[in-house]
Image (cartoon, helix red, strand yellow):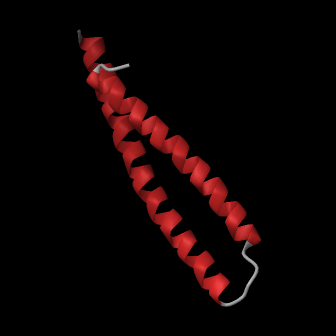
């Protein structure tokens, strides 16, 4: 029983970390999108920024999937 409690505590800690990462990722994505729009408005090339944005979006999708997996693990739904 104690091992199960320790595992749950560890999972809760991991979930808290991932949720913080998702929040930071959301902010970074919004800022990056705003910068791209600003550069587009100035007529600048945004191809590298768009490639970076695509990587950030992929990373965020992985974080969200990890968060959702942890939530399901904690609720006992698999």
Q: Residue at x 53, y 50 (%)?
A: 60
Percent from the top left, x then y, of residue 10? 35, 28
Q: Nearer the viewer, residue 61 or 25?
A: 61
Q: Nearer the viewer, residue 12 or 46?
A: 46
> Relative to residue 38, is residue 28 depicted above or below?
above
Q: Is residue 10 visible?
A: no
Query: Where on the picture, by quarter, is residue 12?
Result: top left
Q: How many marks?
A: 0
Query: Where on the picture, by quarter, is residue 4?
Result: top left
Quarter of the picture holding the C terminus: top left
Left or right of 4 in this view: 78 = right
Q: Nearer the viewer, residue 75 or 19?
A: 75
Q: Residue at x 54, y 41 (%)?
A: 62
Direction bottom: furthest residue: 42
Left or right of 59 in this view: 47 = right
Q: Is residue 42 visible?
A: yes
Percent from the top left, x then y, of residue 59? 58, 48
> Relative to residue 21, is residue 26 depicted above or below?
below
Left or right of 55 in this view: 18 = left
């Amino acid at each position: 029983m104690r091992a199960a409690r320790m595992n749950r505590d560890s999972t809760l800690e991991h979930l808290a970390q991932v949720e913080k990462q998702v929040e930071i990722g959301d902010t970074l994505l919004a800022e990056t999108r705003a910068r791209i729009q600003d550069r587009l408005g100035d007529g600048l090339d945004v191809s590298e920024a768009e490639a970076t944005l695509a990587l950030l979006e992929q990373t965020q999708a992985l974080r969200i999937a990890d968060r959702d997996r942890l939530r399901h693990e904690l609720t006992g739904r698999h």
